[in-house]
Image (cartoon, grey):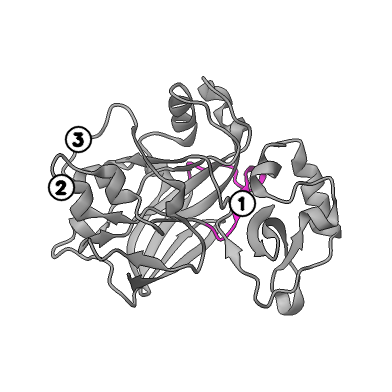
Amino acid sequence: MKLLSYQSDTGPRVAGVRQGGPNGSPAYVDLNRADPRIPPSMRELLAQWPEGLSRAAAAVKAGRALPAAGLKLLAPVPDPQKVICVGLNYADHAKESGAAIPAEPVIFSKFPTAVSAHDALIVLPSVSKCVDYEAELVVVIGRGGRHIPRERALDHVAGYCPGHDVSARDWQMHKSAGQWLLGKTFDTFAPFGPYLTTTDEVPDPNALEIALRLNGQVMQHSSTRQFIFKVQDLVAYISDVFTLTPGDVIFTGTPPGVGFARKPPVYLKPGDVCEVEIEGLGVLRNPVVAE
């Protein structure tokens, strides 16, 4: 099942995607309107995970489709409590960055104000001249928890999305002592979507093709088979430090091919269009503009 959030007159609401709409296009069904027992927001729905899955699936089949024209998509979780990120999680990306392969996951974060959606603009900040692209698999937490065992970690995941860890390299790497948080968390620097694909449609998140295209040119192409730390490793490791809650998102790291490692470097500029595609999860598209 594929779930999305959209902007309504009363605020963000959650919808399911039903195939077989007019002319073969997908139809979107507001789950709460189809079944009032289903919460109207994604985080509330994820708090019912996994028990709410069958009810949501039935609503997608039976509900009336929303008018597709003018529907404004939001990030699948528009208001995550936490945006957790993993650095250097592909061995070949660590090599191109000149870094040693880490013995433990490298964790940092973005603020929720960085969250953005499919087709939303990536805004290049006026105070940065080196904004880079990073295609990533995003993990969305369903059942929360602390000290989650690795063997049960995937049971706490609701689904997956394409994501883009936009990065201001001059802030991240060249400020005094480095500014990983600030370089990663400018507004619009964490788009993900267009929808959340539930785990029942993703047999193995650690075996998915992933690519980023910049203006149609493939810049990154790899597979999550190249993860140093698999999804279950990350969930277990992170939950030993803090409690994961429904709707938390984890950006799991990027493959090689990023802009700063190229010769000459390639950085985003106004007018660019970035597309992140992950096998079975869809395409996240974001145009780039200047602040």
**Residue lying furthest front:** 10
User: Residue 132: which quarter of the image?
Assistant: bottom left
Rendering coords of residue 4 (x, y %): 64, 57
In terms of sequence position, does the residue under pointer 2 or pointer 1 come before the other?
A: 2
Rendering coords of residue 276 (x, y %): 44, 61
Q: Which residue is mark 1?
A: 197
Rendering coords of residue 31 (x, y %): 77, 55
Q: Which residue is mark 3?
A: 100
- Please report the residue visible at 72 percent of the width from the left and 57 percent of the height from the top: 16
**131 lies above or below 105:** below
What crowding class fits label 2: few (fewer than 14 Cα within 10 Å), some (14-19), or many (20 or more)? few
- Please report the residue visible at 22 percent of the width from the left and 48 percent of the height from the top: 172
Type of secondary structure dominating the magenta stretch: loop
* Pick the front one: 15 or 153: 15
**Residue type highlighted by circle 1:** Thr
Q: Secondary structure at mark 1?
A: strand
Q: Which residue is mark 2?
A: 175
Spatial separation of the CA atoms under disc 2 and disc 1: 38 Å
Range of residues picked out in magenta:
193-207
- Please report the residue visible at 32 percent of the width from the left and 41 percent of the height from the top: 87
**Residue type highlighted by circle 3:** Ala
**121 lies above or below 156:** below
Question: Can you see residue 255?
Answer: no
* Pick the front one: 206 or 16: 16
What crowding class fits label 1: few (fewer than 14 Cα within 10 Å), some (14-19), or many (20 or more)? many
* 287 displayed left or right of 19: left
